[in-house]
Image (cartoon, helix red, strand yellow):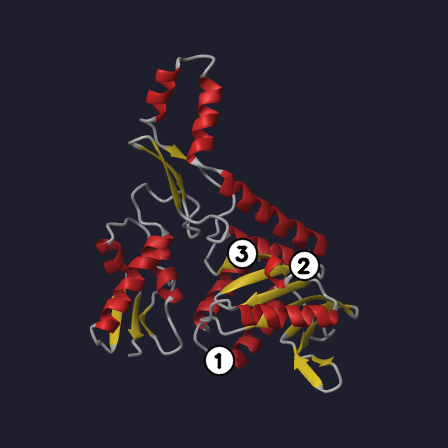
Amino acid sequence: MTAENIWNQIVEHHNKYFNVPEKKIQTVWESIFAELLGYSRLNDEIDRHRNVQIGASERVITDIIIKDNYCDWFIVELKQHNYSLSSEMEMQLFSYLNQLKIDLGIIICGKIYIYDYDYGKDNNEQSKIEIEFIADNPLGIKFVELFSKSTYSKDAVIEFISDLINIDKMHSEITKDLITQLLNNHFRSKYNPSVISSTIDNITLIIPKNYQSPNMFGGKYFNIGKESDVLLDDDPASNVLTKKGNPTTPQVEQYIGEKIEKARQAGDKSITIRAGTIQKEMNGKDMPATICRVMRKFMSSQDEVLYSPKSENSTKYEVKYYLNQ
């Protein structure tokens, strides 16, 4: 089975058990590490609910510690799949890492968060990356390659985290002024300034990227002149850039959030949202994966999926949100 197939199975299980209690999540992920990632229950490589003594009286219980030959590799903290990351989750993981002297940890909730823990840094300075549960996500496929028993390497994981963080830093330095300056520097020996300026003002620049993940690449437009955009696509559900003019993930989040809030303020007890309706209202095209992902992000444990095709990314995908007054 390929890493891509394994990752897509993990996504299916994440979506299938999206609203179930944490006790069930524990069972699911123990099976994922055993059956899909190759760790042995028989050899006690999946250490569940280890008691850790803190001081004279306090004890804590970790969810999963992956180990080999009595050497702890990394800690996995599990939360309900419909939960978003919180500082409390991070503090809990950091406490375990500190106590057990392990410097690699994972939190699994609405996304996967991987931490390279540095004992010399403050908690808010710890290096982390995040991976969305989306079919064919390149980062998810890489997660399988890095954390499978047969290919696991701590050094490779740490290098991967560092590379993604550096990509993020580089991305933040890509600005309208930088691109304009680079183009001017490149062409100034061949053409006069007016020709260069006129050309830049009337072209569209599209910048592709190697890693597609919202935490690394938020949707962002840079305006160059009057008619030109530099588009950094934020849709990790596709290996191609979103067509120019399609709403970005933050725009979809804002639109759905406002729609739910408007219904709440109107006194409605619930609101039903269909992916195809959102796509039509926002004048989008071929973007159900983005919309469905955002719809799931807004769900709480009380909300209900009314219709979900096997792919779970369809214009027919429909959710009923119950509104707390």
Q: Which residue is mark 2?
A: 121
Q: Nearer the viewer, mark 1 or mark 3?
A: 1
Q: Earlier in the sequence, mark 1 or mark 3?
A: 1
Mark 1 to mark 2: distance in Å?
33 Å
Residue 305 position in % (x across, y down): 33, 72
Q: Which mark is residue 21?
A: 1
Residue appearing at x 36%, y 60% in the figure: 313
Label 3 environment density (alpha carbons within 10 Å; few <14, some 14–19, many ≥20) = many
- The residue that appears at 58% across and 68% down in the rendered structure is 90
Callouts 1 and 3 close, C-beta under 8 Å? no
Q: How many marks?
A: 3
Q: Which label belongs to residue 140?
A: 3
83 up-or-down from 132: above or below: below
Mark in the foreground, 1 or 2: 2
Q: Is residue 34 visible?
A: no
What element does badge 2 sit on?
loop
Residue type beneath disc 1: Pro
Type of residue at label 2? Answer: Lys
